[in-house]
Structures are given as structure tokens and as C-alpha cells.
């Protein structure tokens, strides 16, 4: 049977279905509890059971010794309620609450979805998970102290693999490697999660999501997270690209629109023959539809020029500056 769980000190409440773990139910309810491996090995999700009882499941003795169990501690990634519970746990309220890790990963798949766009999926070691907020990014650690940053395109609930959208930059050593010599099972190292680009869930304002090119990646993560937690705020996605090939996951965006009521507006700057949709600059399409942005929140991701123009013009059209959030894609010089 289902059980009710109350978190302290926040007072947040959620229901855990029969057979579900406390952590999975909390994440499904849109609550951010700390975690690491999700399989009872690391102890990052440890919290105290103030009232009620749990089945500790697969919690390993090394992560949760018997004396801690006797004192009421549990690993929420594998603990299942046997009654209604009151738990003491520090919830994650911002990116600063998530530990940044140095981790190895393995190339699990390479899918070329456009001439210059590769979807790269990475697998972590068996006992590891990367906790992150939708929209954050990781940085690959390369030879010579170089780093390359890429936004995470998957939502936190869908984390067995990390998904990145890599645009080929002519002369860019890392992206050329991705497109020409990278192989399945190659090992990479990265640091993350990083960045303050994530959904402000406490707001009730309608959401404008504006992506340029592969700036769609973190926007995809935000949308999938919002849909997963049942966010009721209206969402509008404007995706700008040079041509139709640049809308490399157009079918997915159209499915969101058809199944979830999200408004989707693709915008091409150099439209193909026969294109009957919107044209021009993507942020100007937003302004054409919304001359008064005072009631909105905006999440914008793409090249620096696009993000800078969007902030300048959105604020000029009434968007409160504190309601503008951007992930700026900038590329290292050759």
C-alpha cells in the first residue's frame, strides 16, 4: 500500500507507492533530495527516520552500518516505507547544494542527427550517478589542462546515461575528435554538475524557453523535467536554427506540443525552399508574439550574441531582469 512521507524541516509531503523507494518517489514529486549512486553503496542519500519504519533494502553495510540503522538512519535510494514516515533530510534548494565531482565516463553511443550535430551518450561507473539539476552542464578535462563544456540534455530522473548535443566547430580539436575519431567505449573524464541554469520551480509565472541551435540541449532537459514533475505553468518553446536540418529533434518538440499542450514555434534564419513557418531571429519571434513580457520567466540558451540580444530586448519589453536565465554557448578559440 502507499504511504505518506513528511520531510523535516521543510514540511514537504509526498506519497510513496507500494514497492517504490523513498528517493524515487521524492524525485517524482519534484523534490530534490541528495543522492550519489542510487544503489545503496555511497551513503550520499542518508537521512534520519524520525517516525515510522522502513525496509532498508539493498543498503550496504559499508554505507549504513548496523549501529546507524539502530539510531534511525536510512539510505533513501533503497529504503521503502513500511508505514507513514517523518524524515529529517537536507533538501537541495539550489545548484550550490549539489557536490561537484570529478568522474570518469564511457562513450555509450554516438548518433549523428545532422551534418554538424552529434548526440553523445555517456555511461558512468556501475556504482555512480551524477546528481544534477535540469539545465546544468559538465566540463570535460582534456590534455594540457584544457576544458570543454557541454550542457546536459537529459532530465535528472532519466540519468542512467548522460546525453550531450555536440555541434561540430571547424578547427575545434574536441568536436573534431567527436566527429572523426571518437569510438564507443572510449573513456573520458569530466567535472560537474556546473552552472546556475535550472528551472526555478517556486515561481508560478508562464515560461518562455528560447533555444538557438544546440542550445536546445539544456532546454530539452528543462522541459522533460517540468513534464515529469507535472508542472502546470504554461510553457512556450521557440527554437531557432539556420535551416530545417538544424531542428534536429523537431519531431520530439512537436510531440510535446501534441501531447502536453506546450506551444512550439520553430524559427529559421535561412529558410529552406517550401518553408512556411516563422523566419528571422528567434528572439525577435518571441517579441512579435509577446510585446509585453512583464509577466514571464525566460530561459535562453545559444550563442553569446543571441543571448545578449535576447536579454537586452526582453528587458526593454518589460521582462524583469531577475527573471531572465541564460546558458551562453561560447567556443574556445582554435
Image: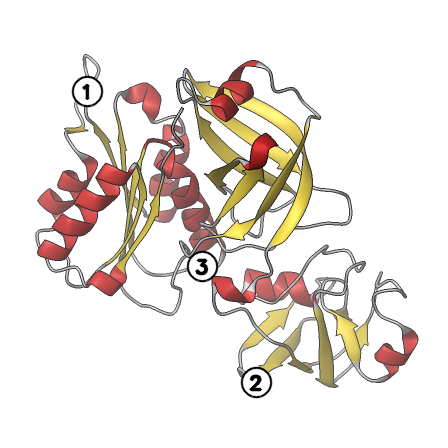
User: Marks 3 and 2: in contact by CB < 8 Å?
Assistant: no
| Image spot of residue 207 (x, y percent) | 28, 55
x then y, percent, for residue 224: 46, 48
The C terminus is located in which quarter? top left
> 35 or 304, which lies in front?
304
Image mark for residue 53: none
* Alpha-carbon span between mark 3 and mark 1: 36 Å
Q: With respect to residue 58, does 193 lie above or below?
A: above
Rounded to the nearest angstrom, the CA distance separating label 2 from label 3 is 24 Å
Quarter-of-image position of residue 285: top left
Q: Nearer the viewer, mark 3 or mark 1?
A: 1
Q: Secondary structure at mark 1?
A: loop
Point out the tag, 2 or 3, that comes first from the N-terminus: 2
Q: Residues within 10 Å of mark 1 (few under 14, many from 20)?
A: some
In the picture shown, does residue 332 fall above or below 136? above
* Residue tagged 3: 230
| Residue found 55% across the figure and 54% down from its top | 132
| Rendering quarter of residue 309 | top left
Task: Give the residue at mark 2.
Answer: 9
Q: Which residue is mark 1?
A: 270
Q: Secondary structure at mark 3?
A: loop
- The reply, left or right, for residue 156 in relation to residue 315 is right
Estimate the x, y position of residue 101 in percent, counting from the top left. 63, 53
Q: Is residue 28 left or right of residue 329?
A: right
Q: Crowdedness of circle 3 by 10 Å Cα count: few (<14), some, many (20+)?
A: few
Real-space CA distance between mark 2 and mark 1, rounded to the nearest whole angstrom = 53 Å
Structure colour scheme: secondary structure
Give the image location of residue 109, x and y in percent.
62, 26
Describe the element under mark 2 as helix, strand or loop: loop
Left or right of 196, for residue 264: left
Quadrant, the N terminus:
bottom right
Whether residue 113 is visible to the viewer of this picture, yes or no, is: yes
Amino acid at each position: 500500500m502507499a504511504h505518506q512521507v513528511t520531510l523535516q524541516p521543510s514540511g514537504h509531503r509526498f506519497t510513496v507507492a507500494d514497492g517504490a523507494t523513498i528517493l524515487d518517489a521524492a524525485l517524482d514529486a519534484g523534490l530534490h533530495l541528495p543522492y550519489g549512486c542510487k544503489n545503496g553503496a555511497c551513503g550520499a542519500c542518508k537521512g534520519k527516520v524520525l517516525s515510522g519504519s522502513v525496509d532498508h533494502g539493498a543498503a550496504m553495510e559499508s554505507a549504513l552500518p548496523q549501529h546507524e540503522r539502530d539510531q534511525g538512519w536510512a539510505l533513501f535510494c533503497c529504503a521503502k516505507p513500511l508505514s507513514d514516515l517523518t524524515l529529517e533530510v537536507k533538501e537541495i534548494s539550489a545548484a550550490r547544494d549539489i557536490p561537484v565531482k570529478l568522474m570518469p565516463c564511457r562513450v555509450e553511443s554516438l548518433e549523428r542527427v545532422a551534418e554538424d550535430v552529434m548526440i553523445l551518450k555517456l555511461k558512468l561507473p556501475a556504482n555512480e550517478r551524477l546528481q544534477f539539476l535540469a539545465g546544468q552542464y559538465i566540463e570535460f578535462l582534456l590534455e594540457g589542462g584544457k576544458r570543454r563544456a557541454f550542457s546536459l540534455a537529459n532530465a535528472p530522473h532519466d540519468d542512467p546515461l548522460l546525453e550531450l548535443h555536440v555541434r561540430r566547430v571547424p578547427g575545434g580539436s574536441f568536436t573534431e575528435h567527436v566527429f572523426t575519431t571518437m569510438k564507443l567505449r572510449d573513456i573520458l573524464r569530466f567535472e560537474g554538475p556546473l552552472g546556475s541554469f535550472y528551472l526555478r520551480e517556486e515561481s508560478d509565472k508562464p515560461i518562455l524557453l528560447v533555444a538557438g541551435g544546440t542550445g536546445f540541449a539544456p532546454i530539452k532537459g528543462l522541459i522533460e523535467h517540468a513534464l515529469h514533475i507535472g508542472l502546470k505553468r504554461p510553457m512556450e518553446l521557440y527554437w531557432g536554427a539556420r535551416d530545417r536540418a538544424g531542428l534536429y529533434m523537431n519531431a520530439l518538440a512537436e510531440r510535446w506540443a501534441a501531447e502536453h499542450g506546450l506551444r512550439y514555434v520553430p524559427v529559421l534564419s535561412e529558410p529552406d525552399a517550401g518553408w512556411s513557418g516563422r523566419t528571422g531571429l528567434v528572439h525577435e519571434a518571441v517579441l512579435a508574439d509577446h510585446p509585453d513580457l512583464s509577466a514571464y520567466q525566460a530561459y535562453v540558451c545559444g550563442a553569446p550574441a543571441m543571448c545578449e540580444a535576447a536579454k537586452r530586448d526582453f528587458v526593454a519589453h518589460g521582462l524583469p531582469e531577475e527573471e531572465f536565465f541564460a546558458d551562453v554557448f561560447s567556443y574556445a578559440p582554435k
